[in-house]
Image (tube, rainbow, N blue to C red):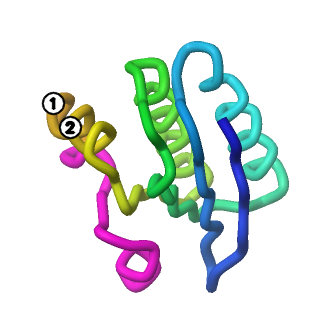
Amino acid sequence: MQISVSKRDDSLVVSVEGRMDTVSAPEFDTRIEELLNEGEKGFVLDLAKLEYVSSAGLRSILVAAKKAKAAGGNVCCCDLQSMVKKVFDLADFASIIPVFDSVEDALNR
C-alpha cells in the first residue's frame, strides 16, 4: 500500500493506493495518527487507486474518523472503485462515513 498526502483548502487529501488489509492497515493507522498529532483535522480519503479493502481496512478508516471527530475534524471518502465500493455497500459504510464521487465533491461539501 502507498499513501500520499496533499493539502487542499482546509483539508488533507490522503490518497491510498494498492490494498488495505490486515498487513497494511497498521501503516494507514500510523500515518493518520501522525497527521492528527501535527494538528490536522479534516481528511478526504481518495480511494481511486485502492484495489482492495478488508474488514481491517474498514476498521482503520472508522478509527481515523472517530479520532478526527474527537479532534474537532472529520473524515470522508471519495472515488470508490468497483471492489472497494462493493465492500462499502455490503458493510453499509456510507451511512457512517460520507462518501463522495470525487475529491472536488468532497472538498466542496
Question: Are there few (<14), some (14-19), or many (20+) residues within 10 Å of tag 2?
Answer: few
Horizontal and vertical percent for residue 2? 70, 43
Q: Secondary structure at mark 2?
A: helix
Q: Is residue 87 left or right of residue 59?
A: left
Query: Marks 2 and 1: CB-CB under 8 Å?
Result: yes
User: Is residue 72 rendered to the left or right of residue 104?
Assistant: right
Q: Residue at x 45, y 73 (%)?
A: 103
The residue that label 2 is drawn on is: 86
Apparent side of residue 17 relative to residue 77 in the rendered image (left or right): right
Q: In the rendered view, tell whether residue 97 sits above or below residue 55.
A: below
Q: Residue at x 58, y 64 (%)?
A: 42
> In this picture, is 105 found above or below 26?
below
> Residue 80 in the image: x percent, y percent?
34, 53
Q: Which residues are magenta?
A: 94-109
Judge whether 25 appears above or below 23 on screen: below
- SS assignment at label 1: helix
For residue 4, side relative to residue 82 (left or right): right
Residue bearing the label numbered 1: 90
Towards the viewer: 109 or 78: 78
Q: Quadrant of the C terminus?
A: bottom left
What is the number of the mark on residue 33? none
**Of circles 2 and 1, which is in front?**
2
Instruction: Give x and y (percent) for residue 102.
Output: 37, 72
